[in-house]
Image: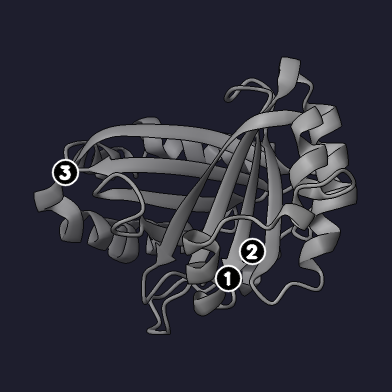
Amino acid sequence: MTLFVHETHHVRGKSEEVFEAAYRDRWMPALAAGDDARLLWYCHHAHGSGPAYHVVTITGVRDGAAWERLARRVQDGDLAGWAAEVDGMRHSLASKIMVPTPWSPMQEVDLGTVATEAQEHELSLYMEDTGWPHHNNLDAYVDLAGRAYAPLLEHSTLLRMEGSFRPAFGTHRRAEMVLMQKVLDYGGLAALLTTETKPEYRKPGTWMHDALEVRDEWESRLLRTTSWSPWF
């Protein structure tokens, strides 16, 4: 099972560019030396949508054994020096290991197809939604989202569901679900941010209404990929 190491870095403002270079020029090539892991996304928290100088990285890891080997490299192996350097470039780090939900479009990742060298491309924007269910009932939340929310995006011109994840056992708050959704229509996103939700989208039988039975705590972050992020 592919594991997804999700990290939110609060980077020191003066270190923003050198921090990015550390991931582009050293972390990505270091992972390419083996078959265990690949950097997938490198994203900035888009300016104007939240805290400044926050970076989100997601690294795909082949399985649990591969994660252990990577962890040892970072702890006291060939990547220990690199890790100490990037620690000095940020105020804080929040990490979790995620696994796909049963209905996530993304399940196993063929790491051999992921780019290992920086390649210039267009920028992309993602809406990352994180929700926390009532009474820690994550199963009910995941089930309803799979039946009522994910199908909405199958025909959406605004967002495309890339993956739905939950924290792996023992690595983070258990009752949490994270959605990575690519923004397809920036004009539609602007309308979403500047208009009220129409009453017909809040009545019984709609996702906005029925989801309140399983959760009313969630947050959205707008993440902008870099021009070299392997996935964008």
Above or below, comparing residue 63 to residue 117 in the picture: above
Identity, as a three-letter code, of the amino acid under mark 3: Arg
Residue drawn at x 43%, y 69% is: 229
Nearer-the-camera pick, 118 or 47:
47
Horizontally, is 143 left or right of 16 in the view? Answer: right
Horizontally, is 5 left or right of 155 in the view? Answer: left
Q: Is residue 63 visible?
A: no
Mark 1: few/some/many CA within 10 Å (<14, 14-19, 20+) = some
From the top left corner, tell me how far across and down residue 186 is, in percent. Answer: 50, 76
The span from disc 3 to disc 1 (Cα, nearest Å) is: 29 Å
Query: Which tag, 2 or 3, sits closer to the chain's start?
Result: 3
> Which residue is the site of mark 3?
12
The answer to the question of whether label 3 and label 1 lie on touching residues, with beta carbons closer than 8 A, is: no
Query: Which tag, 3 or 1, sits closer to the chain's start?
Result: 3
Residue drawn at x 63%, y 36% is: 131
Q: Which mark is residue 111?
A: 2
Q: Residue furthest left?
A: 14
> Which residue is the site of mark 1?
114
Label 3 secondary element? loop
The answer to the question of whether label 1 and label 2 lie on touching residues, with beta carbons closer than 8 A, is: yes
Horizontally, is 218 left or right of 80 in the view? Answer: right
Above or below, comparing residue 70 to residue 35 in the picture: above
From the top left corner, tell me how far across and down residue 18 is, in percent. Answer: 17, 58
Identity, as a three-letter code, of the amino acid under mark 2: Leu
Q: Which mark is residue 100?
A: none
The span from disc 2 to disc 3 (Cα, nearest Å) is: 31 Å
Residue drawn at x 29%, y 40% is: 83
